[in-house]
């Protein structure tokens, strides 16, 4: 499954013209990935996560201090297992984004 996540993430980034850092793939890829939309071009965070608790910790301790209250517009959180976009509610939960189609 690990190889599938790595390939899915790389394919997604290539298709959407998202920069992939050189360090991506050195560690075991997890199902959750974060894309920084506040950078030009948008850039994949090199680390991925397998557990939501670890991802939320990263959001709270690293990204919120960097981008502040603009987190929801500054990052894209993707679950490559369920193939869906997630939003952080700011209170220890990730919520699936419902598409309007």
Image (tube, rainbow, N blue to C red):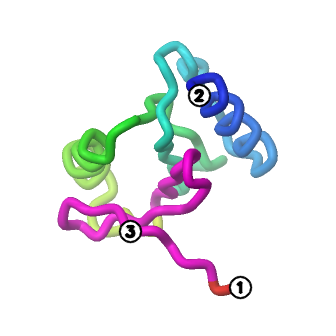
The correct choice, above or below, for 77 with respect to 22 in the image is: below
Split into 4 quadrants, where in the image is the C terminus?
bottom right
The residue identified by callout 2 is 1
Split into 4 quadrants, where in the image is the N terminus?
top right
Q: Nearer the viewer, residue 70 or 35?
A: 35
For marks 2 and 1, give the one nearer the viewer.
2
Residue 24: image x %, image y %?
A: 56, 23
- What label does residue 21 carry, if any? none
> Is residue 68 highlighted in magenta?
no
The correct choice, above or below, for 53 with respect to 90 in the image is: above
x 24%, y 45%: residue: 53
First in residue order: circle 2 vs circle 1:
2
How far apart, in angstroms, are the residues tagged by discs 2 and 1? 29 Å
x 31%, y 49%: residue: 63
Q: Nearer the viewer, residue 78 or 73?
A: 78
Residue at the outermost top position: 26
Magenta residue span? 74-99
The residue identified by callout 1 is 101
Instruction: Kindly indicate the quadrant of the structure image that contains residue 62.
Output: top left
Residue at the outermost bottom position: 100
Near mark 2 (Cα within 10 A), the count class, few <14, some 14-19 or many ≥20, is few
- What label does residue 95 carry, if any? 3
First in residue order: circle 1 vs circle 3:
3
Near mark 1 (Cα within 10 A), the count class, few <14, some 14-19 or many ≥20, is few
x 56%, y 46%: residue: 81
x 20%, y 60%: residue: 92
Residue contact between numbered discs 1 and 3, judged by CB atoms under 8 Å: no
First in residue order: circle 2 vs circle 3:
2
Residue contact between numbered discs 2 and 1, judged by CB atoms under 8 Å: no
Residue 36: image x %, image y %?
A: 51, 49
């Amino acid at each position: 499954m690990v190889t599938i996540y790595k390939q899915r993430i790389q394919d997604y980034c290539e298709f959407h013209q998202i920069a992939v850092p050189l360090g991506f793939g050195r560690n075991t890829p997890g199902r959750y990935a974060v894309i920084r939309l506040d950078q030009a071009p948008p850039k994949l965070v090199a680390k991925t996560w397998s557990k939501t608790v670890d991802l939320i910790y990263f959001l709270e301790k690293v990204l919120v201090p960097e981008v502040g209250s603009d987190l929801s517009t500054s990052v894209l959180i993707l679950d490559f297992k369920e193939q869906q976009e997630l939003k952080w509610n700011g209170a220890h939960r990730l919520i699936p984004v419902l598409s309007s189609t």
